[in-house]
Image (cartoon, rainbow, N blue to C red):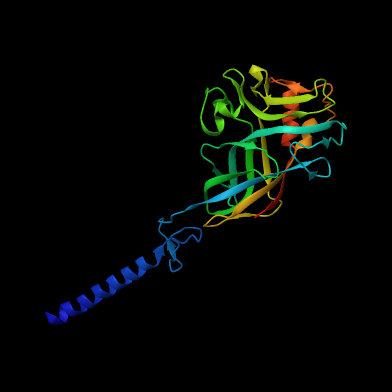
Amino acid sequence: MKNIFQPMFVALVAIAALSLTGCKKEGCTDENASNYNPDAKKDDGSCIFEGSTVALKFDHRWGNTWGPFSMNEDLTHPGTQNHINFTTLNYYISNVKLKNADGTWWTENESYHLVKVTENTVPQIVLEGVPLGKYTEISYMIGVDSTRNVSGAQTGALSPSHGMFWSWTTGYIFIKAEGHSNDAPMDFFAYHIGGFSKDVGGDAIRINNQTFNGEELNVRKGGGASIHFLVNAARLWHGGIQISNTPSVHMPGQMAETMATNFSEGFIIDHLH
């Protein structure tokens, strides 16, 4: 009996050892995961992907030379030669998405941000929980989507307390630009640009899809990634819109749509970090 069972015992031990060795070779094989196992040879589906932060920075500029922009200072529009002094420049950035190098999209949850331009600052939006990886493209809306426009008074960036909400019928102001100009009949300009549907007077929602000029945004553990935009405020009056003829826009319509298009075309990606 001893001669029969001893070889069987040895064989069973060998099989168990091989099984254990095989298990050790399984694990998370994705380097972007927080539990990446460099010794794993086969992915077992256990990878855990931690989110990181990405900052969107908006550096405002002026004119076709992309020169300095300042609030509460006299500026001259390079096309119309109108004199313009901003006291308010606010706008919504929403529905932000990032395209991964593998072609999949990450979409920010509850993606509504109000950019308020103040003196000597570069406003920024911080995206939380962006999966680690490399990204090649960004998509974002300048404005607020139709669903939220008809949802009544809301909170956070969409709170009416920010002064960016008209009513339940006309919705949100997507871009608010106010200030002084001696070219305006009353020495004051006020553009409240919005409109979420042709059925209610106009659609001023604009979506920008922009690549990173061949570069990749590398989102690593610990944060630090950022996208630096240049935003040309002079583009509002592109195409020869004269403050003397159109000192204000307060409702959805063709002029609101034109100025929304102008403004959206003034966003370029300058560099990544």
- The residue lying furthest to the left in this view is 1
| Residue 84, quarter of picture | top right
Where residue 25 sits: x, y (%)? 40, 67
Residue 22: quarter of image: bottom left
The answer to which of 179 and 142 lies nearer the viewer is 179
Query: The N terminus lies in which quarter of the figure?
Result: bottom left
Judging depth in this view, the residue of 207 and 237 nearest the camera is: 237
In this image, 150 relative to 24: left or right?
right
Please name the residue shown 55% across and 30% down the image. 158
Q: Quick check: can you spot residue 20? A: yes
Total marks shown come to 0
Q: In the figure, is residue 256 to the left or right of 102?
A: right
Q: Indicate the quadrant containing the C terminus: top left, top right, bottom left or bottom right.
A: bottom right
Q: Nearer the viewer, residue 62 or 216?
A: 62
Asked whether residue 238 appears in the rendered view, the answer is no
The percent position of residue 48, horizontal first and vertical second, equals 43, 55
> Which of the two residues, 102 or 34, is positioned nearer the viewer here?
34
- What residue do we see at 85% from left, 29% from top? 240
Q: Is residue 143 above or below residue 50?
A: above
* Residue at 68% across, 30% down: 175
- The percent coordinates of residue 266 (x first, y second) are 75, 39
Q: Is residue 19 left or right of residue 244?
A: left
Where is residue 142? Give x, y as percent.
Answer: 65, 34
